[in-house]
Image (cartoon, coloured by chain):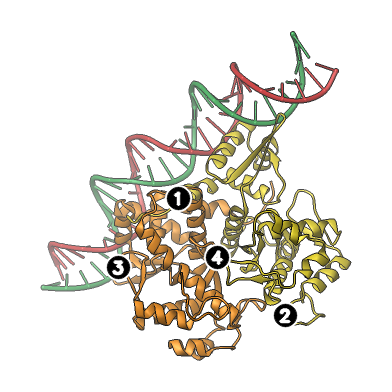
Chain colours: A orange, B yellow, C green, D red
Amino acid sequence: MAEGPDIARIAALIGDPARAAILNALMGGHALTASELAREAGVSPQTASGHLSQLHDGGLLALRKQGRHRYFSLVGDEVAALLEALDGLAAGSGHLRTRPGPRDAALRKARVCYNHLAGEFAVQMFDSLVARGAIDLSAGAALTGVNDGVFGDLGVDVAALRAGRPVVVRECLDWSMRRSHLAGSLGRAIMTRLLELGWARRTHGTRLVTFTPEGERRFCQAFPAGPITESACLR
Amino acid sequence: MAEGPDIARIAALIGDPARAAILNALMGGHALTASELAREAGVSPQTASGHLSQLHDGGLLALRKQGRHRYFSLVGDEVAALLEALDGLAAGSGHLRTRPGPRDAALRKARVCYNHLAGEFAVQMFDSLVARGAIDLSAGAALTGVNDGVFGDLGVDVAALRAGRPVVVRECLDWSMRRSHLAGSLGRAIMTRLLELGWARRTHGTRLVTFTPEGERRFCQAFPAGPITESACLR
DNA sequence: GCGATGCTTCGCCCCCGGCCGAAGCGTTGG
DNA sequence: CCAACGCTTCGGCCGGGGGCGAAGCATCGC
């Protein structure tokens, strides 16, 4: 039997319905307390506690103690990327729990993936940044410095990001589109700004992101799709 | 509890050590018989048979009956991509079964991922193709037609690929590099040619791909890294 | 036809792991 | 100090599922 990374361990962690529900809830990006997650997963607090420590030990969840609360969150973009990939495969194999409804269509357009934007809007943004040379895939997926104005206009202080560690630009495989979108510290910063600017809003308790008409217009102006067609945006 | 694709089902499928070993073996790209997989997983034929039907029903394995043999293989690139992503997370979390040795270093350089090339060479190739405009990420990750000569020189008949369905160009998240490499029908075609041309050879029973000195030179000529530096190839 | 081979189905055992009740520990607030 | 709250640990129950032996079906070779 050939050796390799212990896939089964991680997969088994995700493979329990209660734990999967917990991880799913955390894909919303908010850190949640143990009891909130217990409710979310539909199990008792004791049971949830067990699951949470497993997920924590397994390196999937980060833990922050605060007073008598314990806040859990996904440990990083890689975990979110993996869950999105699983979503994609599960959806593709027809293993849907519910029939695709209007809410799913909205989710496909724009949603939160842990701490960054996902969905059609996110894929368009990623492609636009690559096409304009702002992100270079040939040097380890990093900011090139070209067209940094794009971020400045948005109000994302790239210089500040750069001041810390090198800006992390990660690819995350989109669940619905099966294409890459932008994760990493830059992805998180942009998501934050989209909400601050009021271009988009989140629906509480879900991963749904809704763009305002004005926000959508501005977004498509900032990250135009295709060669350089200013007009047609997301069909 | 929020609804969504049934992640847990798929993850649970991968989460069993025997099944994970089976999937891992199939990442080599060769279709294997039920008994071969049983040996690979270290279980009896009956047990393996059960696992295999589960994986088949779960939509992860394709089955081809041939005489009294049953050949199993991964069902597609998405599954391979998922397994690579899991590999990455498991390796990153330090959940290695064995200490990283020289063989792992070689695997990181070049290996087979189901039916296409993965590792440093593969990532370089993907970036090179994107940088040269041969692959366009802004239109659904497809062949642009630009620079098709690259493929012709290699002996990959793009026209023939095109004649069938639209050429499938898929991204696959690389286990070791955490970057995209090329999957899909084009990725498979190129892998095939690399072996036919003798630029690279596979080590039987493993995912290892070894480039000959001459092959490496030609490969780096065909898919140069960086802006247009012909010389320095893979450090 | 007959045996050998490859694979599956059936039946059973048994253990792992999810689940909750009860109790314990730490924090907060009064 | 005590009570309320959040969370964890412990112990026991129990079901699901992996494991193999034995038997049943196909297919191949002769």
Mark 4 surroundings: few (<14), some (14-19) or many (≥20) residues within 10 A: many
* Vertical relation: B108 (above or below) B5: below
Q: Numbered disc 2: what chain?
A: B
* Position of residue B90 measured from the top left corner of the image (x, y, whole percent): 57, 59
Displayed quadrant of residue B108: bottom right
Determine whether, in the image, residue B124 is placed left or right of residue D4: right
Ranked by sequence position, the earlier of labels 3 and 4 is 4
* Position of residue A25 measured from the top left corner of the image (x, y, whole percent): 37, 61
- Amino acid at pointer 2: Gly
Between residue A111 and residue C11, name the one nearer to us.
Answer: A111
Q: CA distance from mark 3 to mark 1?
A: 24 Å
For numbered disc 1, what is the local secondary structure? helix
Which residue position is annotated with label 2? Answer: B226
Q: CA distance from mark 2 to mark 4?
A: 23 Å
Which residue is located at x 72 percent, y 47 percent? B30
Asked if disc 3 and disc 4 are in contact, CB closer than 8 Å, the reply is no
Which residue is located at x 80 percent, y 71 percent? B222
Asked if disc 1 and disc 4 are in contact, CB closer than 8 Å, the reply is no
Q: Closer to us: mark 2 or mark 4?
A: 4
Q: CA distance from mark 1 to mark 4?
A: 22 Å
For numbered disc 2, what is the local secondary structure? loop
